[in-house]
Image (cartoon, rainbow, N blue to C red):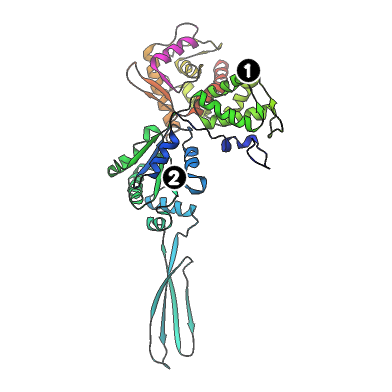
Amino acid sequence: MRLFATDVFTPNQFPEYTYIERPKEDLEGKLRRALATPNVITSLSGPSKSGKTVLAKKMVGVEHLIHVFGAEITSGAALWERVLNWMDAPSSVTEQTSESRANKFGGEVSGKGSIFVAEAAGKGTAETTGTKSTTSGVTRSDNSLAHVVRDIANSDYVVFLDDFHYIPADVQEDVARQLKAAGEKGIKICTATVPHRADNVVRSNPELRGRLAQVDTTFWSAQELSEIAKAGFAKLQVSIPPAKLMDIAREACGSPQLMQRICLDVCFNLGIEKEFDTLKNFDFTPQQLSMILQQSSTHSDFGTMVANMHQGPKERGSERRVHDLIDGTTGDVYRVILLALAFDPPVMEVPYSSLMSRIEKVCKGDGPSASSIVQACRQIAKIALRIAPKERVLEWDDQELTGTMSVVDPYFLFYLRRSRKLDALANKHAAS
């Protein structure tokens, strides 16, 4: 059954028409119930690129979702200004006052009236033989919460505040107060954030405790991601072996967004440009898949960050020990750790014990000492924070020798695995 009666489905529509439910998570039901609860703010938490915005659009409807980005908010008032801009509502009104007074030839009368109009302020004077009339206007701001309440309170519209954690810290408290007031007045609100910042809204205003409905999403499994490919290719009348779709899914690092990107590059590589009239069989070799994945990695550039991690901080004292590696190169503890993170299979969280196991596999002989590995993991996390202070790319949970390296952004792990950056850095080191 085709998606449209007349239109033709194209690969570029993968993100738009391959929404897949996750029955085990029941995210749709949880979000629906949260938004239906009066006077409660919904907090949608989940890893970066895990489909939070897509979920909100699906459940609320694009026409009813007022999408506001946290990075755009500089004050509580700015939040409602963004909402009004989405609604195409005027952000200011003019109060017009008129006064009429008789001249020396007539009796003296006066009167005042007030009207609000959504126009620029103006002032004018008109004279007749008997009276002089003056009209003046004073423009006042109307980007207030009251305006928003008048227009969308107790309606199907939802204010979706994306990336709440990107709002400046000194502004979050003001915004949280505004959200609390809006929720009490019948405005449906949903904030979206990453797991480690999920409590920012409550911490910004403790009075919201007990008035927040938490909906938590997680990274997708390879099986769930493969359903995206199945749905999209089926609409294109394309059949690809299920095992190959699972190969793609495992590379997507738990991200539906990344999965859709890879599927699009599969189409480009195989010459699939639009929906076929009849079912067509396609396949690709491991070499083709490698080229496809490398192409997909070019859509996110972590080159500077990886180069800094590879180099590590400036050396003090003795030089770092160099190790022979399975890719035919040599490198110090920093290259060893990056190769271990990039090793198969892709994993977003690598506990210390697993990291040591991976390090043994990427080193031909003896690997770095435990103390140097822990110290290097600390430095790699610091480098990530220094280069991308507003993003959470990866971090090291430091607990002596039981820490965990968490890769938060799936695009970073995918870039580390499938770009040629580590090869280029090895060649540069060898040349020097």
Q: As shown in the figure, which amino acid type bears the numbered disc 1?
A: Pro
Q: Position of residue 239 (x, y in %)?
A: 65, 25
In the image: residue 275, left or right of residue 401: right
What residue occupies the far right of the structure in this picture?
Answer: 277
* Mark 2 and mark 1 residues within 8 Å of each other at the beta carbon: no
What residue occupies the far bottom of the structure in this picture?
Answer: 105
- One can see residue 137 in this view: yes
Give the distance between the C-alpha atoms of the residues marked 2 and 1, in whole angstroms: 42 Å
Secondary structure beneath disc 1? Answer: helix
In the image, is residue 319 above or below residue 238?
above
In the image, is residue 259 above or below residue 180?
above
Q: Quadrant of residue 294?
A: top right
Q: Quadrant of the C terminus?
A: top right
Q: Quadrant of residue 230?
A: top right
Badge 2 density bin: few <14, some 14–19, many ≥20, Cα 10 Å: many
Please give the range of residues in magenta: 347-366
Q: Which residue is mark 1?
A: 286
Badge 1 density bin: few <14, some 14–19, many ≥20, Cα 10 Å: few
Query: What residue sits 46% from the left and 36% below the top?
Result: 52
Front residue of this view, candidates 235 and 62: 235
In the image, is residue 313 above or below residue 105?
above
Q: Position of residue 187 (x, y in %)?
A: 39, 50
Q: Quadrant of the N terminus?
A: top right
Front residue of this view, candidates 420 and 137: 137
Front residue of this view, candidates 259 and 378: 259
Q: Which residue is mark 2?
A: 160
The numbered mark at residue 314 is none
